[in-house]
């Protein structure tokens, strides 16, 4: 059955791979699955056809036969549950890998998103200058804890899993701020994720999608 995901018609990051279709592409590549990408403009995201797929009018979405999903975490969990390579077979190790997916999305990503919001949507507010350092400290606190848990290990819990895929994707969003580089072991962890052939293919595909297509495609 054909898998179709949606992505920005043109990502605002110009192909830096920071939009959330990249993490879904990465999971699909790790699982060795072919997929198609349907571009959606910002206006079309809020139209009924797309809202029927995504109640919040966003990308990415995932369609496969009569299954339609939204939320990158749920999509990656679905892919990882159905195909080998992203979740361990051992039940306890599998549960721990899923825990890391939730930790990435619920505990590490929120302050990172706050920073992005503060910079791009609230940067002109009079209180913005005072708020930014507070958010940056909240991020550093989480990164200290994450870095302590990772230690000298390659991945968060044994072999690479969907937990690492989501965590690396979340941390990547932080790179433009410079904060990631304050934590060399986490920067190296992210670099290991980026070096995976599946990530390389996903990144190249989104870059080509965002730079070489005409918007009439
Ligand atoms: N929780 C949802 C998920 O994980 O799937 C969040 C989905 C989401 O935020 N989608 C964004 C979107 O559709 C795109 S990824 N935004 C349009 C809208 O809400 O109207 C977020 C994103 C956007 C831009 C950049 N960038 O330019 O660097 C990076 C990430």
Image (tube, rainbow, N blue to C red):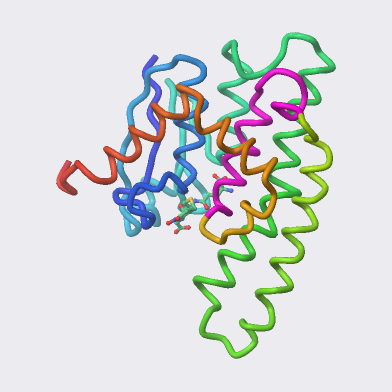
Query: Residue 173 in magenta?
Result: yes
Q: In front here: 124 or 159?
A: 159
Q: Give x and y (percent) for residue 116.
A: 56, 64
Going 70% across and 18% down the picture, which residue do you hit? Answer: 159
Going 59% across and 10% down the picture, which residue do you hit? Answer: 84
Quadrant position of the C terminus in the picture: top left
Q: Residue furthest bottom?
A: 126
Segment tinted magenta in the rendering: 153-175
Q: Give x and y (percent) for residue 71.
A: 57, 41
Name the image quarter holding residue 203. top left
For residue 91, side relative to residue 11 (left or right): right
Going 58% across and 54% down the picture, which residue do you hit? Answer: 174
Q: In front here: 47 or 80?
A: 80
Q: Give x and y (percent) for residue 59.
A: 45, 46
What number of labels is visible? 0
Going 42% across and 20% down the picture, which residue do you hit? Answer: 65
Name the image quarter holding residue 204. top left
For residue 8, side relative to residue 176 (left or right): left
Query: Residue 41 in magenta?
Result: no
């Amino acid at each position: 059955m054909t898998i179709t995901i949606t992505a920005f018609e043109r990502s605002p990051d110009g192909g830096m791979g920071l939009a959330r279709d990249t993490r879904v592409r990465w999971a699909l590549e790790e699982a060795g699955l072919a997929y198609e990408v349907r571009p959606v403009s910002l206006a079309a995201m809020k139209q009924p056809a797309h809202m029927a797929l995504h109640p919040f009018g966003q990308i990415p979405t995932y369609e496969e036969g009569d299954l339609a999903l939204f939320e990158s975490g749920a999509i990656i969990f679905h892919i990882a549950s159905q195909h080998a390579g992203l979740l361990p077979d051992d039940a306890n190790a599998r549960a721990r890998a899923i825990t890391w997916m939730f930790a990435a999305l619920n505990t590490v990503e929120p302050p990172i998103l706050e920073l992005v919001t503060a910079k791009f949507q609230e940067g002109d507010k009079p209180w913005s200058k005072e708020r930014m350092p507070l958010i940056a400290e909240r991020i550093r606190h989480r990164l200290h804890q994450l870095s302590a848990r990772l230690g000298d290990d390659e991945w968060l819990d044994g072999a690479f899993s969907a937990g690492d895929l989501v965590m690396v994707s979340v941390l990547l969003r932080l790179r433009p701020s410079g904060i990631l580089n304050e934590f060399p072991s986490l920067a190296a962890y992210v670099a290991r994720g980026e070096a995976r052939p599946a990530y390389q293919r996903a990144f190249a595909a989104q870059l080509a999608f965002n730079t070489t297509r005409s918007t009439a495609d």
